[in-house]
Image (cartoon, rainbow, N blue to C red):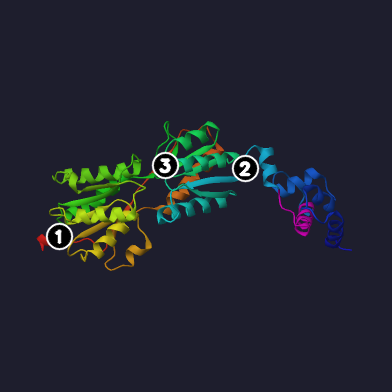
Amino acid sequence: MSTSSKGSAAAGKAARPGRPATLADIARAAGTSLSTASRALSGRGYVAAAVRQRLFEAADELGYVPDASAQTLKQRTSRTIGVVVSDLGDSFYAQVAVGIEQTLRDAGYQVVLVTDNEDGAQEVAAARTFLTLRTPGVILTPVGSEATTLLRRQGVIVVEVDRQLAPDGCDAVVLDNQQAAIDAMSHVLALGHERIGLLTVDTAWTSDAGRQQGYRMALERAGIGVDEALVMKVVPTEAESLVERRIRNLLGRNGLTAIFAANNMLTVLAWRVLRQAGLRLPDDISLVGFDDAPWMDMVTPGVTVVAQPTFDIGRRAAGLLLRRVESRALPPAVERLHGGLIIRGSTGVPRKRR
């Protein structure tokens, strides 16, 4: 009888119908000690190649699945990482999540992904869930600081993405939002526009604050005063229909020739309103957006936009978390990435210059 046949016979005797196979069943089927089976199936510690192979074959035949909860209790941690993003329907967050998941999967971790809908209470609820799962780390696009504080008090590693809200600082990956807004505005100003509207989010988040600062700095550098009547701030929970109505009202402001929409959702709404109003890009008005999305180069004309390195943001955030798992003594690291301006047909010389 071959070794494989012996293993099959032993596995048959060790298996009990009606209950999942245990590590002890695998050890009995392969004729090894429990500790040897544990080392082989966990990948921690030396086991002779032939014995390891025998254990794997027995595990396959018995349909053995490791008890993740038991391993978590024993090790006081798990191989699961929590990820909290604001909205998976937003291409920015979706691509960031892809970068995180692929990097962590390659490192042997599983990801549990949660959306908080930009709601602080939901973010805290997600944090409590991750505490019960004993996750060693959480990556999040923070809405507030409460969830971060709760996690860190319990020894959980936190990496912030897109925004920095931790009261005492922690690892983070963010865009240089101020410079990105300056680049977008400088392009429009160079075309001859002076009356440029800003669509932005009315929050204390560092991402939005940086883009507002960049808008103002670019105008000031060009010797143009900021007209607050051209600055439209929306709250995250504001209904799309109301936002669209406010954009239509903004179009009536005296001399407006261009709009800078400071995130991709506002870019979508601005583009929709301009089309509904029968305005042609860039003949009647110019539009520059933020966060490149597939639709932006599929419409005619394509939308000029600040593109964020979304996948790289996620990949780097995962890298910072893995770095922190290896050494918690390291000082907090903040990686600041740069956006790239993609010039398409939605921006052009204003009508008065033609």
Instruction: Name the main secondary structure of what is drawn in magenta.
Output: helix
**Labelled pair 1, 2 in contact (Cβ < 8 Å):** no
Q: Where does residue 346 sit, x and y in percent of width and height?
A: 24, 62
* Type of the residue with mark 2: Ser
Q: What is the C-alpha distance between the residues marked 1 and 2?
A: 58 Å
Q: Does the magenta-highlighted stretch encompass residue 106? A: no
Q: At x 53% / y 34%, what residue is drawn?
A: 328
How busy is the neighbourhood of tag 2: few (under 14 within 10 Å), some, or many (20 plus)?
many
Q: Nearer the viewer, mark 2 or mark 3?
A: 3
Please name the residue that numbered disc 1 is placed on. Answer: 350
Range of residues picked out in magenta = 51-66
Q: Quadrant of the C terminus?
A: bottom left
Dot 1 falls on a residue whose secondary structure is loop
Q: Where does residue 34 sit, x and y in percent of width and height?
A: 80, 44
Please name the residue that numbered disc 2 is placed on. Answer: 78
Q: Which mark is drawn over residue 143? A: 3
Q: At x 34% / y 67%, what residue is drawn?
A: 298
Does residue 153 appear to the left or right of 354 in the view shown?
right
Q: What is the C-alpha distance between the residues marked 3 and 1?
A: 38 Å
In primary-sequence order, the first of circles 3 and 1 is 3
